[in-house]
Image (cartoon, coloured by chain):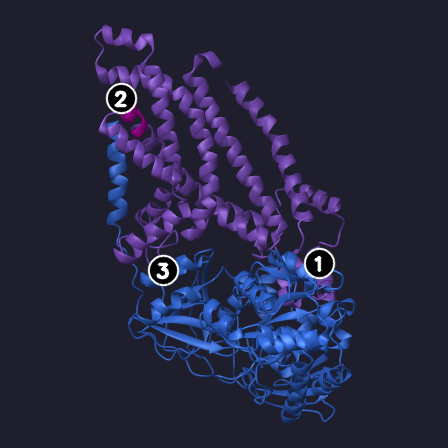
Amino acid sequence: MTAYIAKRLLAAIPVIFGLTIIVFLIMAMIPGDPATAILGSYATPENVEKLNRDLGLDKPLLQQYVIWLTNLTHGDFGRSYTMNRPVLDEVLERFSATLILAGTSLVLCSILGLLAGIVSAVRQFSWVDKSITFVVLIGISVPSFWLGLLLILVFAVDLRLFPASGMYAIYGGGDLLDLLHHLFLPALTLAVVATGVIARLTRTAMLEVLRQDYIRTARAKGVSENRVIYLHAFKSALVTVIPVIGIQAGFVLGGAVYIETVFQWPGIGSMLVKAISTRDLLLVQGGVLVVATGYVLFNLAADVVQTILDPRLR
Amino acid sequence: MKRLLAAMVAFAVLAFAAPANAQTPPNVLVVGQIAEPKSLDPHAVTAVNDFRILMNVYDGLVRYKDGTLEVEPALAESWTISDDGTVYTFKLRDGITFHDGSALNAEAIKFNFDRMLDESHPQHDTGPFPLSFFFSSVDTVTAVDDLTVEFKLKEPYAPFLSNLAYPTGLIVSPDAVKEHGKEFGRNPSGTGAFKFAEWEANAKVVVSRNDDYWDGASSLEAVIYRPITDANTRIAEMLSGGLDIMVEVPPDSLQQFRDDGQFVVHEQAGPHVWFLILNTKEGPFANKAVRQAANYAINKKALVDNILQGTAEVAAGPTPPAFAWAYNEDLEPYAYDPEKAKALLKEAGYNGEPLTFYVAEGGSGMLDPIAMGTAIQADLKAVGMEVKIETYEWNTFLGKVNPGLEGKADMAEMAWMTNDPDTLPFLALRSEAMPDKGGFNSGYYSNPRVDELLEAARRSTDQAERAKLYKEMQTIVQEDAPWVFVANWKQNAVTKASVENFKLQPSFFLMLQKVAKPQ
């Protein structure tokens, strides 16, 4: 197992660095440069040239990339010109906020999705199954940013039960309770779509498994129904569902971009959007590097769990 | 399974149990900003969003008089200008200290400008200073004595004083810059009504009252600036009581706040103009009659009333009325007169040649560029002008428009916000300001008389004289119609009804020293 994990990690390195090259090239190819973005209306060729020189952007592209890479090996991610602070500080701060949000959502959608899927499958075609399917389909179809705004309108503006935005209260607060309070609406919004996908998939996987001979045998042996469902059937179904949860982790990370914007969550998604529109190359590079690494690790974790569950894959 | 359910219920209960602490405390003002500030170093930033904090933490030598764009003394209590307009001598107020305790003196002023302008200055590397060209006319700065500082200019430059009133002219503490170096922008120290207290990245910037402020201490204990980038979220936060002031309210939501007695809506026209650059070098717009026809054909009133929902006023010429002293009151906007436009087009021999129109997707001061572009297209079609729209993302758009429209387009949207009536026409309407010469005259307008007037206005140090020159320039430019003059934006803000003495400024800066919020 250790050898497997090490191999996968090594394989991830060229993927991530290939990605940084692609991002670097894309950022270089899209029109507009940081100096123009900073200067706005005042971007005369003369001012742009001077600012580019001050920012070190007058060097050839390849040289810029090599400098970035060399600095990176020393743990120096460079300095963001829009945030005027070290990229690493900004990226780590933002990524931990995203992890809290996306991690909570992922746990939330896995639990809700699996539960809904199992109940649906066990009571196939009953009114419970139909109502779950109905709700789940709505969940998959609703745009998450719209749902987020709606939740803010109801729970923050009208009922004033939850704060409309931010991660902590701006005065007082700052403890775990305060965090949970701020986390509830965005985490729920972010979890909705993934919950739907996981629920649909779990239902199908469970139905498949429940038709197998060994389930019938277990029932015939007089094993209790709960044991049949949760121990025998669910464990097999999980093998199909786990990789999907891994993929959903990617979607949750991606969806965080909207949700972070809507709820003003100080995460890495909203940071990347801003960094791209202001052509903040180093911040984009740093952000992508961290997100990509996170994504690779998520998938690896999902694969490892799957391998543990399914001996055939070993 | 039961344990899982229990954990989830606990999560929900905990989340519900925390108090919804949406009310803001008395004497602490919470301001909803549109973005996280880049830096609190006034020389390193360019965004109005950052200026809203900086103007309350720092002072300049001069400042804009309340409610105007005219300069009055601030850190300098008086000044003299040499007859040839090249030497400005400022007398500083005595006894002022920076928030870090160091003294404000002539050497400190010299340090500020040398840091920005002198590439060999030991602290020049704490930049870059993107707007330092505001002071590129400065040759030397000399500390004559402890409280007298002298600026020698390379040539007469009348906008110098209003540039000093701009955030790029705010005075920072040399000691703090030396101590913090590149991190000064996160450890700022000025002389302003509020001193920096805390910056929690992406959550808030807190400034607290400067009890020793030379112009009277504020009644507010502190101001908290919260960055909320999404306009809908900003509105929700305002409605749920988490903000005391919110700036840049989308037009769609203004009415909602107007109808609600808990809020007060503020509006103030600013030094902003929204216009269409016309390509005067080639194609149909090389003919003045066609350019005038476009001005008559576009229903500007409908644009500002319907699309911008009253958040702007119809523009008459190249200079916004907010520059009250320099604005030509006699100028009437081009009327909406499609018949006259058709007649002019006929007279000019225009036969429906297709026109290319650059439209931006967004951008600083661009208001609602796509909707406006589409409405303009429809108005022009109504008089027989066939317009093809090309839409670009803002940075790409600037990259297309700034190098000039020749060979690419016939017209382009543009908006400018400036601090002196000199800036926009000088950079965008002179023969010497063509794109290949580093200017913004992307439509290649050229009129020798306009060149003369603008050069003379820049050399004159007499405001009345300058006003006369600018007024004549406006009359000529309106007649020549190198642009379609469309709108002057009104900045808006919403405050809670409990916020007292709040006022928006024509400079678009947010001045909070006199604001009170007793409850």
Viewer-proximal residue, B98 or B150?
A: B150
Instruction: Name the residue type under label 3.
Output: Glu
Instruction: Name the residue type under label 1.
Output: Asn
Tell me the tag on residue A52. 1
Instruction: Same chain for labels 1 and 3? Say yes or no.
Output: no
Viewer-proximal residue, B206 or A245?
A: A245
Check the residue under mark 1 and report the chain it is in: A
Residue at 43%, 15% (x, y): give it: A310
Check the residue under mark 2 and report the chain it is in: A
Residue A127 shows in this picture: yes
Q: Secondary structure at mark 1?
A: helix
Chain B painted colour: blue
Q: CA distance from mark 3 to mark 2?
A: 44 Å
Viewer-proximal residue, A86 or A118?
A: A118
**Which is the main secondary structure of the residues drawn in magenta?**
helix
Q: Is residue A117 magenta?
A: yes
Q: Secondary structure at mark 3?
A: helix
The stretch of residues the image draws in magenta is A116-123
Instruction: Name the residue type under label 2.
Output: Val
Residue at 39%, 39% (x, y): give it: A141
- Chain in purple colour: A
Q: Nearer the viewer, mark 2 or mark 1?
A: 2
Quarter occupied by residue B226: bottom left
- Residue on which the image places disc 3: B237
- Residue on which the image places disc 2: A122
Q: Residues within 10 Å of mark 2 (few under 14, many from 20)?
A: some
Tell me the tag on residue A214. none
